[in-house]
Amino acid sequence: MRKILSLFVFSFSFLVSFAASKAEADALYEKEQYKDAAAAYEAVLKNEGVAAEVYYNLGNCYYKQDEIPLAVLNYERAFLLDPGDADIRANLALARGKTIDKVVPPSEMFFVTWWRDLTNCMSINAWTITGIVAFILMLVGITIYAFMSQLTLRKIGVYGAMAMLVIVLIANLAALSQHADLTHRDTAIIMAPAVTVKSSPSETSTDLFLIHEGSKVEILDGSMKEWLEVKFEEGKQGWVPVSTLEII
């Protein structure tokens, strides 16, 4: 009992501390002291842990200072934690629109786009709750089917249970997909003003093309100490120095 009480007190203290620290950062933002607010939000993330709302507010601070690469980076981190948030999506699109490289992603099968949009319509926590609620309702449907004698109720029970089973499966797959994205961070944002992409991990290798700050890349090979093989959203790939980008 004492351990449970101690855990409760610690959790409550943590929440109070987080709220107080974030409130201070919010106050600086409202006063349009964006540089100080950004430092305060960075401290909240470092000391209190990550949160989509804090990354979003931090992105806003950098956007107000015209620090577009940092704005894109933090909006992307917020999106990773809460892809269903409309404000995060809108501001990320706005920040991307101010980057130099205008990327047209390659076309993909419609069901791939459909599944990604469905997966990203809610956060991992929301999908988890949806799955739990659907599972409970599925059990209720099975119970109705098993113990009710009226045919109409039995049909409602069995069809309802089948529908809830589909929702349970979708919710679990969506939550697992988002968990994989959170666990395996294989995307990054170019932070250097301009980077020459190389054909191999060497300064003397062939120059392929130029990429600018704020562009998003997928990491293909991270085995080299000072170089990363990356693929850009439009499909091109090559090698860039580790120091030129930041992992989302």
Image (spheres, grey):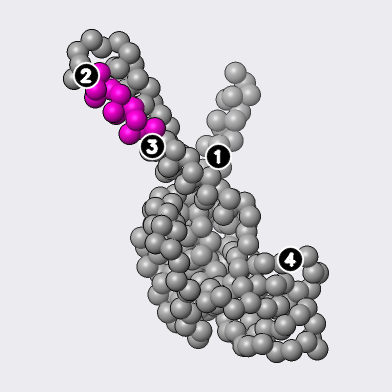
How far is the residue under mark 1 from the one under mark 4? 39 Å
Q: Earlier in the sequence, mark 4 or mark 3?
A: 3
Residue 8 vertical placement versus 244 (above, below): above
Image quarter of the N terminus: top right
How far is the residue under mark 2 from the one under mark 3? 20 Å
To which residue does mark 2 refer? 153
Query: Which numbered tag is attached to residue 166?
Result: 3
To which residue does mark 4 refer? 222
Q: Earlier in the sequence, mark 1 or mark 3?
A: 1
Q: Earlier in the sequence, mark 2 or mark 3?
A: 2
Q: Residue at x 53, y 61 (%)?
A: 77
Query: Which numbered tag is attached to residue 81?
Result: none
Is residue 178 in view? Answer: yes
Please indicate whether residue 145 sits to the left or right of residue 244 in the image: left
Q: Earlier in the sequence, mark 4 or mark 2?
A: 2
To which residue does mark 1 refer? 13
